[in-house]
Image (spheres, helix red, strand yellow):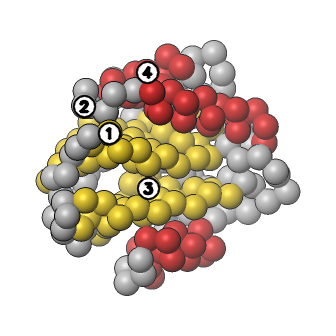
Amino acid sequence: MRLAVAHQSRPKPGEVENGDVALVRQDGAHTLLAVVDALGHGPVAARVAADAVRCLADLPLNAGVEPLLEALHAALRHGRGAAIMVGLFDGQTLRCCGVGNVELRTRGTRVPVIPTPGIVGQPIRSLRTVSAVMAPGDRLVFFSDGLSSRLDLEQAQKLPPPEACALLLERYARPTDDATVMVADVEIA
């Protein structure tokens, strides 16, 4: 199986730089999906988000999600930190781990991820990792707290990922925060 992925992000209205970012990266059989929500807004938050992306861009993906979050924790230790949700898909199984208030919702196969309370870069409890075998037709939606937790996936269920992202961002983005959404559909390869 493979993923059809799209993401959209925008800074807080009135800001130029964005402290939220999404990253999709393929390395061999693994696909990395990540949403980063740096604390705050503006240039400082944008630098933290960029540091997180640089860190994730260089790490091997075959070791699992916990090593990715541990590396991010070390990379962001001297800044304000971020909430982060990371998923690794190997063509069959999705493994997820998150810290803070970035969410993952699914349509189809249930992925019972509960983010660890805290901030990556600050002291946190032990990480909670979950995995689920995915099926064709499943949809994954990662989003920062810049979107309302009342987000309704049914409104975008028949839209392809780019249009689904646009609709969810338009309808659920909060005017007081940066906002990011990523939609990934599981497809037969």
Q: Which of the two discs, 1 and 4, sits closer to the camera? A: 1
Work out whether mark 3 precedes mark 2 in sequence or the reverse, and give the earlier one: 2
Where 146 sits versus 56, above or below?
Answer: below
Classify residue 188 as left or right of residue 162: left
Residue marked by disc 1: 27
Work out whether mark 3 precedes mark 1 in sequence or the reverse, and give the earlier one: 1
Element type where label 3 sits in the image: strand
Badge 1 vs badge 4, beta-carbon distance below 8 Å: no
Residue marked by disc 2: 62
Q: CA distance from mark 1 to mark 2?
A: 8 Å
Work out whether mark 3 precedes mark 4 in sequence or the reverse, and give the earlier one: 4
Residue marked by disc 3: 142
Q: Is residue 88 visible?
A: no
Query: Which class describes the residues within 10 Å of circle 3: few (<14), some (14-19), or many (20+)?
Result: many
Element type where label 4 sits in the image: helix
Q: Is residue 180 visible?
A: yes
Name the amino acid, label 2.
Asn
Residue marked by disc 4: 71
Name the amino acid, label 3.
Phe
Q: CA distance from mark 3 to mark 1?
A: 20 Å
